[in-house]
Image (tube, rainbow, N blue to C red):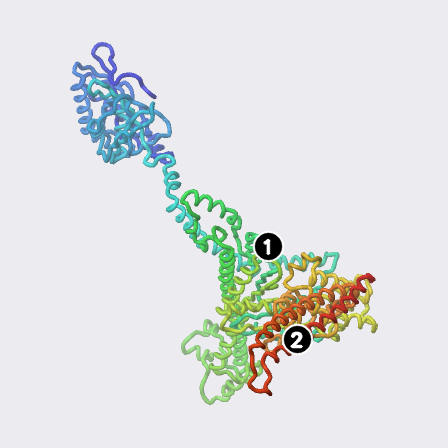
Amino acid sequence: MYSKTASTSKLDGDSQERWLFIDSVFPIRLGIWDLRHYIGILREETLLERLHERLETVKAHDFHIRELQPYQKDGGVFVRFTYTARDNQNALETLQTDLQLEATKHGGLPSWSGLNDCNIWLVKGEPFLEDMYRYPSGIVHVSFQGPDVPEEALYSLFRPCGRILNITSPIPVPAGTLRSSDILFHRVRSATVARNTIHGYTFSNGGGTTRLRTVYQRPIQAHAIRDWLTSHPRIVLPIIFFLLGTLTYTIFDPIRVLSVEGKMLNWFDYREYKLYKWFRANALDRFSLTSLAREDVSPQGDIWKERKDAECAVRSYLSDLPTTVAFVHGPQGSGKSRMLEAIIRDTGRKALVIDCAELNRATSDTRLVSALAHQAGYRPNFTFLNSVNNMVDIATVGLIGQKGDFIDSSSLPGFKSSLEDQLKQILEVTGTALKKVNHSLRTSAQRAVKAAQEAEARQTEEMRTRARIRAGTWHDPRLDCIAGNGIICELGVGDELLEGDDNGFASFDAMEKIVVNSSGGGEKTSEELVRQQRRHAEDVQAVRTLPIVVIKHYAARGGIYKDELLAVLAHWAASLAENQIAHVIVVSDNRENAKLLARALPSKPLNSIALYDADAPTALSFVRRRLHDAGTTSDLTPAQNKAIERLGGRTSDLERLIHKACSGQDIQEAVEDIITSGVGELRKKAFGEDIDDAKSLLWSREHAWTVLKQLARKAELPYYEVLLDAPFKGDELPLRAMEHAEIISISTQHGRPSTIRPGKPVFKCVFERLVNDPVFQATQDIALNEKIISSAESTIRTCESELSTLQDLSKAERSFWWFRRRATSERKEYLLKKMRSAQTKIQTLEKRNVELKRVLAKGV
């Protein structure tokens, strides 16, 4: 409520009306969260009655209380009273003194806390009671409705209310706005007294009057924090990102480790729960109308003898602590993944599989990070933060004039960090989870071994007890409760073994040894042997509990982020193997891809394991077995056997043949379809669809045609013979590129390239089909001949230039010995022979081109 009356109201006669303010009657409410005002609400009626009784005892100057108005927000009570006096100033001072003495005589005025430390203040201005959200604070904002009030006058006016810490000077303000000062009190109680007693006070100064308006000022202004944060980005942004990084390390990283560990141990796979297995075995499988899908039969055992060496090498690697990385390489479709799946399934080891082929299909770094996180079980993964990077750069450039390079990329993966840092962060968390998986599996294995040892100890003790019973030396201590102790217990035998020459017990040890030996205990029972066996068992457990990390399709084709991904995976695999955290098996289609791993392990050689295609008898046996398993006749005719031999021993091609045969297609027709599709595939892969497509290849059409033409006639070619001959002329890059594209395969001997073979066995027939195509052969031969002719013509021009130079040198050269030939003459003869050979080659190839063009003219 706002009163427009004067500070002193004139009533009838000499009676006058004024206001008093009594502080601390109720608790001062500091905010909406302050619940103490409910105490004042509950005690309001009692406190006002006691306050009225205490004040009405004063009768000086006809003092009479007209009204008590509680103001709980500021913790006080306004008292409206009347009095009679001719000297107002002296009368008011006398009344205030008498009221204070009366309160002191009775132990103070009543308050909500019971301390009775309330004070009585004369209101100099006008009471202003309001219920807005303007809660008391230690700062009183004083506005001047008139000329400015000097600082000394403000101090003298407000100092009786309490200690003042600071008074601010008025500052320039826009027109129409009142100038003001802020007064900072030491206590909030003093500020409430000043605000309620001086609001509306009229100050006179040199003929001018100023009305004072008071209001509480918040210690922290609205939007002050926001304004300070936005005005100090160099301080605020690093702190924010540091806190986000700390939050990541303390909260999200443990969750991610737990997520990866749960994926490895199948915590989140409902198919591994015992309830689901029981329900499936007793309900789903029994009532299923279709039989379970037949597991794919892997070409193992006696049928696939070529896989035995590779499988034994992998099992040998997994049977010892890892010191290096196992690199399994072989042509695509040779059964590498299937062999590893069978080994992992047989050993029962926990495995984490990372498929590089899926990762290389990612079209952006965000999708690549998401794919890797999904394969590793890395959750939560905030990949959406990558989209904020550009916005952050724009914001930081606008605020501080430079990009936010101060952000620690390792603290918050996905935000202001490079692709390599994000991949490393995911793999580091995965490595930590692998350590925990190893520890968890080892603990479970140790518990199982301990339980087995305890069971064995119980069994041994039971056998000892039976032996004692048969020997008559066993005593049941429960009989002591019946027979008693002391002398009476001599009726029994007791728990201890009896010593002496009694024949009844002399053979006890022998009987016990016989029982133990008969149970398979053996003769070696020394403590040293037991310790060795236990140590050996612990070593075996340490190896068997190690998880397996399989990186498939390493260095697969495609992917704009292939190099970064492969480099990060190589260093991570090397660290896992060196620290003996897990067995790491890298699977690749090309042995050349081992170079990246070799750089990550410079001091240790890779455990290279190669898989090759099956020979003809093994391929025939495999096809017969699979056809028999599929319910198709396994009796093959000689013509069908010959057709299968043309197909070769590549697993993928044999599986494709079996699928076609099971669909009702004849085996010879199926083989012909596979070869025909291979012709189209190879023509596109090796020569390109058109000229523009051929330019994007890492080899020329002449390179591919030279190799294909020779492999169509021979099963294998010497590597260095092809390398040194035209059109390669010592350049290994085209051969390596064709090997990487699986057009050819290069075998090694003693660590060096040895021979060149077709990329797949079926390519032998494909090469023959391409070479026997007269139009295609003529086209490629003409292009190759033209290139050779151009090279020969260049050789002739070089020789001609050198011969002209030698002609000038021969005139100045003199021979001192008549039987000694000149050097220029010998060089001339060599160049002439070289020119003659090049010219002969040009003539031969041009004649050959004329014949080839006739073939093209026929269009056959």
Compared with residue 507, is residue 794 higher up or lower down, i.e. above or below?
above
Q: Residue at x 55, y 56 (%)?
A: 373
Let me know if residue 446 appears in the view.
no
What residue did someone put label 1 on? Answer: 362
Q: Left or right? Give the position of 291 relative to 50.
A: right
The span from disc 2 to disc 1 (Cα, nearest Å) is: 55 Å
What residue did someone put label 2 on? Answer: 834
- Relative image position of residue 446 (x, y in whole percent): 51, 69
Compared with residue 826, is residue 556 higher up or lower down, i.e. above or below?
above
Q: Amino acid at mark 2?
A: Lys
Quadrant location of residue 125? Answer: top left
Q: Secondary structure at mark 1?
A: loop
Few, some or many residues within 10 Å of mark 2 (<14, 14–19, 20+) = some
Q: Left or right? Give the position of 28 relative to 701.
A: left
Which of these two is toward me, 317 or 490?
317
Compared with residue 824, is residue 775 higher up or lower down, i.e. above or below?
above
Q: Secondary structure at mark 2?
A: helix
- Relative image position of residue 815 (x, y in whole percent): 57, 83
Which of these two is toward me, 803 or 683?
803
In which quadrant of the rendered image does the C terminus lie? bottom right
Q: Amino acid at mark 1?
A: Ala
Quadrant location of residue 565? Answer: bottom right
| Residue at the extreme top | 13
The label shown at residue 29 is none
In which quadrant of the rendered image does the N terminus lie? top left
